Amino acid sequence: MTTSTAFPHLFDSLTIGPLSLRNRTILAPMCMYSITEHDGVPGSWHQVHLGARAAGGFGMVVAEATAVSPEARISPADVGLWNDTQRDAWAPIVETIRSYGALPAVQLAHAGAKASTEPGLPGYTGASVGIDDDGWQTVSPSGINPVSGLAETRELSTEQVRQVVADFVDAARRADEAGFEAVMIHAAHGYLIHQFLSPVTNQRTDEYGGSVENRTRLLREILAEVRAVWPAEKILGLRISGSDYVEGSWSLDDSAELIAGLVDTPQARAQYGLDWVDVSSGGIGDTYRGPSGPGYQLHLAERIHRVAEATRDSERPLTVSAVGIITEPGQAQQIVLSGQADAVSIGRAALADPNWPARASVELRPNSEIPFPPQYHRAQRAL
């Protein structure tokens, strides 16, 4: 990690893998549920939404959970990267993000048993969408739903699990062709990879179930095979649920052990090529039993950040970002300054204010260059 001072400022540049961000603010991936044709092809909404946050000063802009296959979508209204039409539609959006100074990234995802649900928008309940209503048969490690109330899900065969790996690889290849400079593998929030990690939802008896080594195998295979096709000069990232806060499910100790195994030797770093981890939580179980309030997931990121410290002297140290009700500039700055994380992912606050980084820079580093397009220079005195 390269910084301009002994203690990093939120608006110091940040090196992740081989690339540099202009600052340490990241637009968190947030589903927009805006594909009215249900074909997974992004459109003008995504161009405006993501472009506005790039113009607003974020160091990295991460496009929402993007399905690696049709059945991987959370809802019929999700975006995808399972075909070339989608790839070609992403390309101008990626260029828009880059043109405004942000690094363009995409989260690749498979919803598993939590797929084929109603869009997470006002007026919907989040219930399963029936096959006769443009829904589909969902899949999972063991035919077990991570939350109650969803439609019955089907257990994947061993061959089908390997096809999931291939789908992630194909989507990553298309992400590269579209011009994205970072991919984030979504292994959090009770979606398919997370369903494999948790012994609550993974009760398989083949090489993908049982021991921790087996339950993490799918994720490790995806990382290794994506890294093999993802250019070395680009960033490979991962989002995890640091803990489910559910007895007998995925825990913070499990997360720390997983990340250590991915980065603690030169051989592991070469095999998996992991550059960045974004630490969230939850997704398995009906009731969230963890902490709440501003920065409620920081203790999880801080633990993973301590694991990452072992890589600091390596050629490509692991970067850790924190996420979860980080809304105030001073709060974000303290997270970075105190060493709880290297960067912050901003979600809800960025929906309310696409110029969150520009406003934060005025508060935290007055009289310095504001990450704002020159066309907006007259707004600077209003920030």
Image: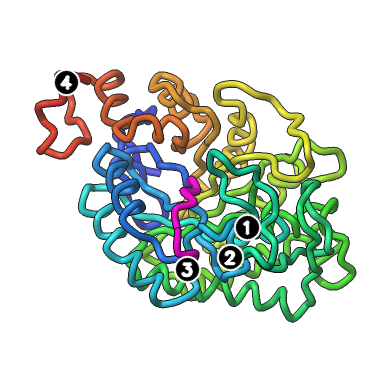
Residue at screen point 85% across, 51% down: 200
Sequence-earlier tag: 2 or 3 = 3
Mark found first going from the N terminus, 2 or 4? 2
Q: Which residue is disc 1 drawn over?
A: 262
Indicate the secondary structure of the residue bearing disc 2. helix
Residue at horizontal 40 percent and vertical 55 percent from the top: 105
Q: Residue at x 66, y 51 (%)?
A: 260
- In the image, residue 203 above or below residue 340: below
Label 1 secondary element:
helix
Task: Report the residue marked by disc 2.
Answer: 223
Residue 320 visible, this orientation: yes
Give residue 70's quadrant in the image.
bottom right
Residue 313 visible in the snapshot: no
Tags 2 and 1 touching, CB below 8 Å: yes
Nearer-the-camera pick, 125 or 241: 125
Q: Characterize the local packing of mark 2: few (<14), some (14-19) or many (20 or more) Cα atoms within 10 angstroms.
A: many
The correct choice, above or below, for 182 with respect to 318 in the image is: below
Circle 2 or circle 1, nearest the eye: 2
Residue sitting nearer the eye, 365 or 121? 121
The stretch of residues the image draws in magenta is 30-38
User: x%, y% of residue 296?
Assistant: 61, 26
Give the CA separation, mark 2 to mark 4.
42 Å
Query: What residue does disc 3 label?
Result: 39
Quadrant in the picture for the C terminus? top left
Question: How much space separates mark 4 and mark 3, taking CA atoms?
Answer: 47 Å
